[in-house]
Image (spheres, coloured by chain):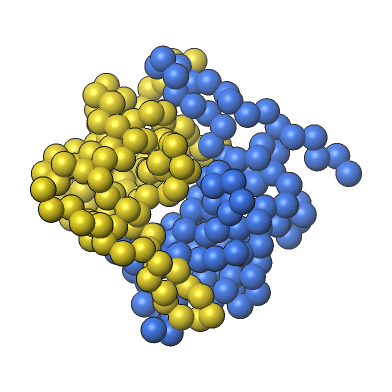
Chain colours: A yellow, B blue
């Protein structure tokens, strides 16, 4: 069946959550949002493009930082209201320069930082 | 720092997305939603508990199906508006009896089913 981004289920704001997972390691790097056009652009270009809720604009991941995400495969869940993006991440995915945004673990009731920022000086 | 579920950032409906990942394999199994009480219950009991938006009720994963999720570790993202749950899944995670909800891949512009339902007859 040919895929049409319009067949996904978007929330009231026209957005769908997209989970980015490093395809080689399985590490979950981040979660961000897409609208139908961002889904289409990501599939067309192979460059992961989100919708920035704070800036209300398309967000080609890494366009300014260079920390791009190349799409390996997009997957749709059973309810068609969430996307899984298998990607190749260049540099850290998080704006804090950590490899993943999920660098805070809850251990023994405490917040524990489990990942340090990477050195990204050019 | 002691963790307090009230410090997470919930959406207008009081919910936060939670990604369930099989801790042993790294496979992303599903995404569902929690409210602050569901976060607290999950941490207290070690049994993953979501908030069902359709039923407007707590949803102890596997309570009826037996396909439970035991929490190995909960992680918080940089914006505190998304959770990653490292879990031990018993049986399939998806209500279609597939191991993961993300069983539809987009390949060559087509929707492709990449995972069959498991045999879960008792």
Q: Nearer the viewer, residue B61 or A121?
A: A121
As drawn, which residue projects farthest toward the bottom?
Answer: B2
Spot occupied by residue A24 in the image (x, y as percentages of width and height): 44, 37
Q: Residue at x 36, y 35 (%)?
A: A87
- Identify the residue at image location x=26%, y=40%: A90
Res. A71 visible in picture: yes
Q: Is residue B12 above or below residue A120?
A: below
Q: Which of the pair B79/A15 is nearer the observer?
A: B79
Residue at horizontal 46%, vertical 32%?
Answer: A75
Residue B119, placed above or below residue B28: above
User: Which corner quadrant holds the N terminus of chain B?
Assistant: bottom left
Q: Quadrant of residue B9?
A: bottom left
For residue A39, side relative to residue B96 (left or right): left
Q: Position of residue A28 (x, y in %)?
A: 43, 49
In the image shown, does B115 or B60 lie closer to the viewer?
Answer: B115
State the residue in front, B19 or A101. A101
The residue at 48%/73% (across/down) is A106
Q: Quadrant of residue B48?
A: bottom right
> In which quadrant is the C terminus of chain B drawn?
top right
Residue A49 spot, x, y in % from top left = 24, 36
**Compared to A37, does A91 lie above or below?**
below
């Amino acid at each position: 069946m040919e895929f049409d981004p319009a067949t996904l289920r978007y929330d009231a704001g026209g957005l769908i959550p997209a989970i980015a997972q490093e395809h080689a390691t399985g590490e979950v790097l981040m979660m961000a949002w897409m609208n139908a056009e961002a889904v289409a652009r990501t599939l067309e270009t192979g460059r992961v493009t989100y919708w920035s809720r704070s800036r209300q604009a398309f967000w080609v991941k890494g366009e300014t930082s260079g920390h791009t995400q190349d799409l390996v495969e997009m997957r749709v869940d059973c309810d068609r209201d969430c996307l899984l993006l298998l990607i190749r991440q260049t540099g850290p995915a998080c704006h804090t320069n950590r490899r993943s945004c999920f660098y805070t673990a809850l251990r023994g009731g405490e917040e524990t930082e489990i990942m340090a920022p990477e050195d990204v000086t050019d």
